[in-house]
């Protein structure tokens, strides 16, 4: 039981005194970057999905 309490005390100490937390501005900037990257990747996947769907429809049209 002593090891568990020591673990939690050490973890708390590390989080409070050793971790460098981002400022509010840094957090907002990182959030915007993640949102923009997510939108770009979503659009790319959507375009690839649409393109492959159209290509398969064209191929299937020749056989049916």
Image (cartoon, rainbow, N blue to C red):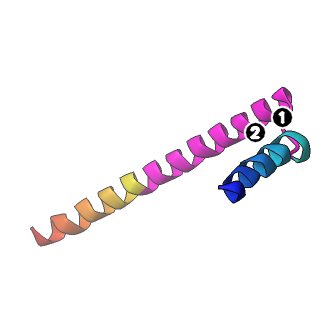
Residue 26 spot, x, y in % from top left: 84, 34
Q: Secondary structure at mark 2?
A: helix
Extreme residue toward the front, this view:
1
Which residue position holds label 2? 30
Q: How many marks?
A: 2
The N terminus is located in which quarter?
A: bottom right
Residue 21 spot, x, y in % from top left: 84, 39
- Name the residue nearer the viewer: 54 or 48: 48
> Alpha-carbon neighbours of circle 2 within 10 Å: few (<14), some, or many (≥20)?
few
- Name the residue nearer the viewer: 25 or 43: 25
Q: Secondary structure at mark 1?
A: helix
The residue sitting at 78% across, 47% down in the picture is 9
Q: Is residue 55 magenta?
A: no
Extreme residue toward the bottom, this view:
63
Tell me where the magenta segment starts and ends, as one range: 19-48
Residue 42 spot, x, y in % from top left: 51, 46
Q: Do the numbered discs 2 and 1 sit on residues whose CB atoms are within 8 Å?
A: yes
Q: Which mark is residue 26?
A: 1
């Amino acid at each position: 039981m002593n090891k568990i309490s020591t673990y939690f005390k050490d973890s708390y100490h590390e989080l409070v005194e050793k971790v460098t937390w981002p400022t509010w501005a840094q957090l907002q900037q990182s959030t915007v970057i993640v949102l923009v990257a997510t939108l770009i990747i979503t659009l790319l996947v959507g375009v690839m999905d649409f393109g492959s769907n159209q290509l398969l429809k064209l191929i299937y049209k020749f056989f049916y």
